[in-house]
Image (spheres, helix red, strand yellow):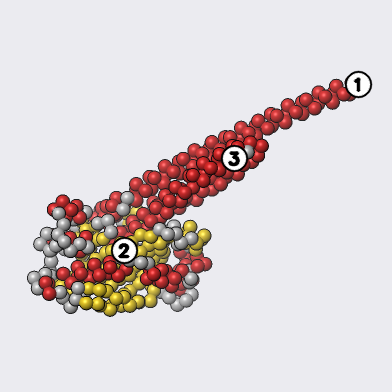
Amino acid sequence: MSGAGDAARPLVLSGHVTALRLFDLAYAIDLGQAERLWAGQARQGARSRLTGTPPKAVSFGDPPLGLVLPTMPLTLHEPSGPAEVEVAVVARLYAFGVVALAVQVPAGGLGWDAFSARVNAVDGAIGPNTPTPFWHGVLDLLREPIAGALTRPNLSDLEEDYLIATVHRFASAVPAAALGREIDLVPLLSGETRRLADGARADLLSRRFSYYTDDLVILTWDRAFIYEPQGDTDVADVIEVANAQFLEMRYYDELLDAELPRMYDLVERAKRRFSRGPRRFAGLARRLYTLVAEVTELTEKVDNALQVTEDVYLARVYAASLDLFRVKAVSAAVERKLAIIRDTYAALYDEAASSRAGLMEGAVVVLIIVEILLALAGRH
């Protein structure tokens, strides 16, 4: 039912609100095996592709696997009172170990103010500032059936979330130019009921993209608005990929943050125990080499998760998402820490080689002395 203040506002005939929550499930996921395990339980799943973009224009490094979960009831607390809705739930698995859970809440047949209120109600029910039992309940439905496809399962404490408000059709034609100007998108994008300062409003609406006169995407740090009359999901898909990349880069950034102090401590202990130095240096060098190889392999998969070549519009949205979520900044931090570990590995390798050479030289000297002593003893 439309809100009381909606009389002069457009009626949203077709639309929905999508709440995303992303988790790092494992070191890697065998998507082919996960698809077979899921299908073995007579459940629906398919490898993802962008629906409105030619394959040659956009390519996934390893297309994620979408799995359909049972619909669930959700209670929303809206200004007009509590609303019980059935929500669709989809999980998308990425080869580099991330799962993106998407809960789609119907939002058609609402006036604009009521549509905006529904976005905020979804945020209040299952958004970032709410406890996670709902999401972990969804995760439990997914994790057991695909357990055999997870390599080194390890659910970290890191999570990412995002909210996407999508309109496919208004009751009357609304040009994209009117959205954000004649129709105020700021309450929807900010979640605020008080009017924002002009500078804050301008910043909130600054990442605005349109290709046709009747489509629009506006990106913010934790929310996006999409007006897409054709019903394509490509923009929402690339926003999800960017979130998945950000989560995985954050995971490796924190992993290396924890690893560097341990590495320094192990190097110092290896130096103090000089008698076992060469062997300890070599063992520590091998451990660091393995860490660098594993992190490099996975970060390359993350970097190559999606390649946008010929679709300029989608490329702009994707690049803006990566920039907004600071994916490249975190990736650069990971690379700097990997460089420190690589340098340490090289130094340890050289130290082990030098120690072995010193021991060999010492052994040769001892053998020469023994040979001289034996020769002298033979004369007597």
Residue at position x 40%, y 58% in the image: 158
Classify 360 as above or below 147. above
Return the residue at label 3: 270
- The numbered disc on residue 380 is 1
- Badge 2 crowding class, 10 Å Cα cut-off, few under 14, some 14 to 19, many 20 or more, is few
- Of discs 1 and 2, which sits in the foreground? 2
Dot 2 falls on a residue whose secondary structure is loop
Query: Which comes sooner in the sequence, label 2 or label 3?
Result: 2
The picture quadrant where one finds residue 193 is: bottom left
The three-letter code of the residue at mark 1 reads His
Identity of the residue furthest to the left in this view: 8
- The numbered disc on residue 66 is none
Residue at position x 62%, y 42% in the image: 280
Classify 179 as above or below 74. above
Residue at position x 30%, y 77% in the image: 86
The three-letter code of the residue at mark 3 reads Ala
